[in-house]
Amino acid sequence: MASVRVPPTVFGIPFGLAGLAGSWGVAAGKGNAPTWVGDALLALAAVVWLAATAGYVAYTAHGASPMVEPWPSSRTSTRV
């Protein structure tokens, strides 16, 4: 079975959700928003983080190096 490439940048999704949950919590503390939405976002961020971690571990467990690009980077000339 071929493994699906999981880049480290996938962790930006749960971190963004956690940041949104934190912002929502600040708004809820000032009485501008319901608190349950921030709690739900934080729980969703935890679930997404666990899924991203499981996928990343499974990807690297199959012998894939997480620090090596799977394709060559583009080379552009900076000469004028």
Image (cartoon, rainbow, N blue to C red):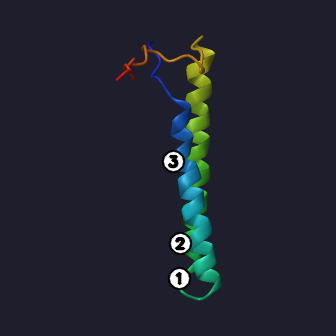
Q: Quadrant of the C terminus?
A: top left
User: Which of the labelled discs sits on residue 33, or is there none?
Assistant: 1
Q: Residue furthest bottom?
A: 31
Q: Is residue 4 left or right of residue 31?
A: left
> Dot 3, crowdedness within 10 Å: few (<14), some or many (≥20)?
some
**Residue 73, relative to residue 26: is it above or below?**
above
Q: Can the viewer see residue 74?
A: yes
Whichever of labels 2 and 3 marks the residue nearer the N terminus, that label is 3
Q: Quadrant of residue 79?
A: top left
Q: Cβ–Cβ below 8 Å for labels 2 and 3? A: no
Q: Residues within 10 Å of mark 2 (few under 14, many from 20)?
A: some
C-alpha span from label 2 to label 3: 18 Å
> Label 3, on which residue?
13
Could you tell me how far apart the alpha carbons at marks 3 and 1 are, in whole angstroms? 23 Å
The amino acid beneath tag 1 is Ala
Locate residue 20: give its quadrant: bottom right
Quarter of the image with the N terminus is top left
Q: Are marks 1 and 2 in contact (CB under 8 Å)?
A: yes
Which amino acid, mark 2? Answer: Val
> How far, Cα to Cα, is label 1 from label 2?
8 Å
Q: Can residue 44 be seen in the rendering of this structure?
A: no
Viewer-proximal residue among 22 and 2: 22
